[in-house]
Amino acid sequence: MAGVGHARSLEAKRILLIVGGGIAVYKSLELVRRLRERGTVVRVVMTAAAKEFVTPLAFVSLANEKVYDDLFSATDEQEMGHIELSREADLIVVAPATAHLLARAARGLCDDLATTLLLATDKRVLYAPAMNVRMWLHPATQRNVATLHGDGAWFVGPNIGDMACGEYGPGRMSEPLEIAEAIETALMQGARLPPPDGLMPQGGALKGRHVVVTSGPTHEPIDPVRYIANRSSGRQGHAIAAAAARAGARVTLISGPVALFDPPGCEVVHIESARDMMTAVEAALPADIFIAAAAVADWRAAPAAEKIKKDQSGAPALSLIENPDILASVSRGSKRPRLVVGFAAETTDLIRHAQEKLVRKGCDLIVANDVSEGAGVFGGATNEAHLVSPAGVEDWPRLRKEDVAARLIARLAEMIGDERAP
Ligand SMILES: Cc1cc2nc3c(=O)[nH]c(=O)nc-3n(C[C@H](O)[C@H](O)[C@H](O)COP(=O)(O)O)c2cc1C
């Protein structure tokens, strides 16, 4: 996960901070301060062990909110029940996430308020682990982390460095600003968990299928320090990969450089340039469905081996070379998936360009969206998609990108299920 600044995105958000009993608890006090500076409402829950390190009063003073620590408190339960405490948050953050908390959460134990909230939540949980290097590297902890990751949890850190116990290695909790940045990323990506399988309308619709999705921008190097990029955030592509995984598919997500967490349940290949993406897509085939949601650079520069110096001879001229056309080559290649879906981001004549692209690239469906100024697609939370196929054009209302993804996957499942044209 790479980081970007979205200073305003934490304003008025509600974070439930679960504090475990580790020496790094002093950094969580700083985290509360940093979040409050950004206008975030922070409710703090402390484990019994956490209270051995700092008193609830320290968190009350910084958060300016009541601190919760007792599952069986009649007054707390009457004021704000434990389920409500967990549900009203936009995101749950566990910092420090002790080895013991990770173990209990991975097993689904709920023997105190902290772990009960972790089990009752409908939001993803961001863990900031903090522990001795041996504890972190212990196979039991690594198993617990893998289990939680598989369940959709996100992790920030731990960092490598000197530890309070005098040892050196991975286990230091991330710094408060790193955690604040990870919280911004998590909130931008949407922290609400999908309904459990039993409640999923399309659960299993793509079971046994392999879906390859590309997402995000590509970076085309100019020299060792500079590159050509575009404004794609990867939110739509990542949401599509997550929706395909929820529908039971085996998903390979090939992602350019984005500030997003890897979606749960997907095999993620991280690449930089269009040519890397082409290689990764070829390696991922065969597949049943290919969805090209990435904003692949059309051109690249012939990169200089050394940093281009600013000198008296003026600005350098960049001569550009055409990049491989990933969508067309998959669509016309010998390993063509049964369904090939392209995206068209246009600023003018959206539908006409999308229809031309459908024919030119030989794909089954184009998801067209208007990226002219003010349409707010790049980096935004919503998308107004138009589905262009040989059968015609279907206009979808403005929807959250997660909802566009769910609809698209439901449509593709239908199409591949009965092999009809859309
Ligand atoms: C001085 C001291 C420092 C500790 N630091 C950590 C730590 O950084 N990480 C950790 O996982 N456990 C640490 N522990 C052990 C936990 O406090 C212990 O496992 C406790 O049961 C955790 O409970 P909790 O997960 O409910 O907060 C420490 C214990 C002591 C005495």
Image (tube, rainbow, N blue to C red):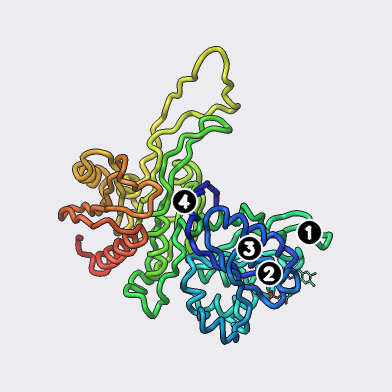
Confirm or deny contact between disc 3 and disc 2 (CB under 8 A): no
Left-right relation of 311 to 245: right
- Which numbered marker is on residue 255? 4
- Which numbered marker is on residue 163? 1
Q: CA distance from mark 3 to mark 2?
A: 22 Å
Residue type for callout 2: Leu
- Residue located 23% across and 52% down the image: 386
Residue type for callout 4: Ser
Report whether the residue tagged 1 is closer than 8 Å to ligand 1. Answer: no
Which quarter of the picture shows residue 397?
bottom left
- Which numbered marker is on residue 128? 3
Q: CA distance from mark 2 to mark 1?
A: 26 Å
Q: Position of residue 309 (x, y in %)?
A: 59, 21
Q: Nearer the viewer, mark 1 or mark 4?
A: 1
Confirm or deny contact between disc 4 and disc 2 (CB under 8 A): no
* CA neighbours of label 3 inside 10 A, class few (<14), some (14 to 19), many (20+): many
Q: In which quadrant of the rendered image does the C terminus lie? A: bottom left
Does residue 257 show up?
Answer: yes
* CA neighbours of label 1 inside 10 A, class few (<14), some (14 to 19), many (20+): some
Which quarter of the picture shows residue 337?
bottom left
Residue type for callout 3: Ala
Q: Nearer the viewer, mark 3 or mark 2?
A: 2
